[in-house]
Image (spheres, rainbow, N blue to C red):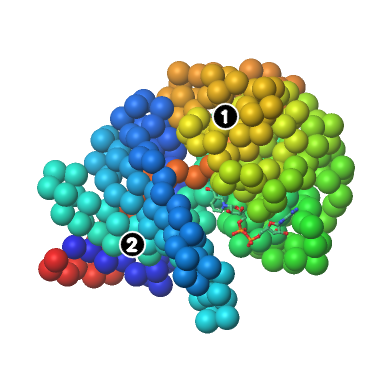
Amino acid sequence: MIIVPEAVIADLITPEASFDAVEKVFASMAAKSASNFPVIREAIGHADALYGFKSGFDRAALNLGLKSGGYWPGNAEKGLTNHQSTVFLFDADTGRCRAVVGGNLLTALRTAAAAAVSVAHLARPDARVLGIVGAGHQAAFQLRAVAAQRDFARVVAWNRSPAKLDRLAAVAAELGLPFESVSLDDLGAQADVIVTITSSFDAILRADQVRPGTHLACMGTDTRGKQEIEAALLARARVFTDEVAQSISIGEAQHAVAGGSLRADEITELGAVINGRHGGRTSAEEITLFDGTGVGLQDLAVAAAVVDLAVERGVAIDVDF
Ligand code: NAD
């Protein structure tokens, strides 16, 4: 069995490799050669923790496994990340445990990669202004991954507390992109691509703040009750997702579907666009919206890529198990 510790992962996998892994598994999902199994998420009644796992099987890549972990709110005082996860991969032919891989950095990379894949396939080719809503842990990863998908000239960003935009501004500077903290009205009026990555439970961005031709990657809503976008915007947009079942239950589309302004059969899996079965954006004026809910198969895909890289570079720990 191979172990790849969290500490070595940053030197192994790049945003580009994460993009390739996620794009392939979205395509497999849409081709029905990969499926996610029901998600488990429970309050364990200890340390205020939320624990669960996401699992699945990609028959094309033979990736079988699960990501286990959750949220421990007291971790920060112990010098640990509140979100903790570990990926377990199993041999699809024998069921033996093949690898255990640190899942914290991978979660951020695979989430950012999903947004980037949506931008690559759905944003207008001439998109020049990138808007980011949110400035938490995930936001910097989003900026890095998405900025690589178009010839962006600048970044505009909004956060509930603007002072926390510093870290995003530093990433933009590293990427050579001018950065401006703006109001939501200005963000919607200027951005060609908008990434939302907050933990809000109320709509932040209104339909009338977004102009025709925009692509939105809505990445923060991954739980029942969370919401970043006014439901009216989903009714107006062409909506894509990683997995329809998650989109309508825990994703951004849950509110529009519950309110009757969007039907589940109007939502397209991004993998269908990658596979060429769906044409994606139909005009320069259309608003496209990717509801990125985060599926277990994404975790397995990036973890398998890391295992291959760790073996290749001689940093995998091989143990008898
Ligand atoms: P974080 O706690 O580091 O940051 C939270 C961000 O949300 C901050 O910018 C904060 O200002 C903003 N925010 C919180 N409540 C808000 C409100 N009511 N109105 C406006 N802004 C608000 O979190 P993070 O790790 O960056 O994660 C952000 C979100 O992304 C979380 O909801 C998380 O569950 C989700 N997430 C989704 C996926 C996926 O695959 N879709 C993966 C990882 C994380």
Name the kind of residue labelled 1 in the image: Phe
Corner quadrant of residue 5? bottom left
Query: Total marks drawn?
Result: 2
Mark positioned earlier in the residue sequence (2 or 1):
2
Residue identifier under label 2: 101
Pointer 2 local density, CA inside 10 Å: few below 14, some 14–19, many at least 20:
many
Ligand 1 found in image quarter: bottom right
Q: Is residue 48 left or right of residue 210?
A: left
Camera-side residue of 130 and 73: 73
Identify whether 265 is placed above or below 201. Answer: above
Q: Is residue 285 left or right of residue 138?
A: right
Residue 218 place in picture, x, y as percent:
64, 41
Q: Which part of the image, by quadrant, shows the N terminus? A: bottom left
**Distance of label 2 from label 1 (alpha carbons):** 30 Å
Camera-side residue of 49 and 77: 49
Residue 112 place in picture, x, y as percent:
55, 50
Camera-side residue of 137 and 274: 137
Which residue is rendered at x = 45% and y = 63% of the image?
44
Residue identifier under label 1: 240
Pointer 1 local density, CA inside 10 Å: few below 14, some 14–19, many at least 20:
many
Which residue is rendered at x = 69% and y = 27% of the image?
259
Q: Is residue 40 left or right of residue 214?
A: left
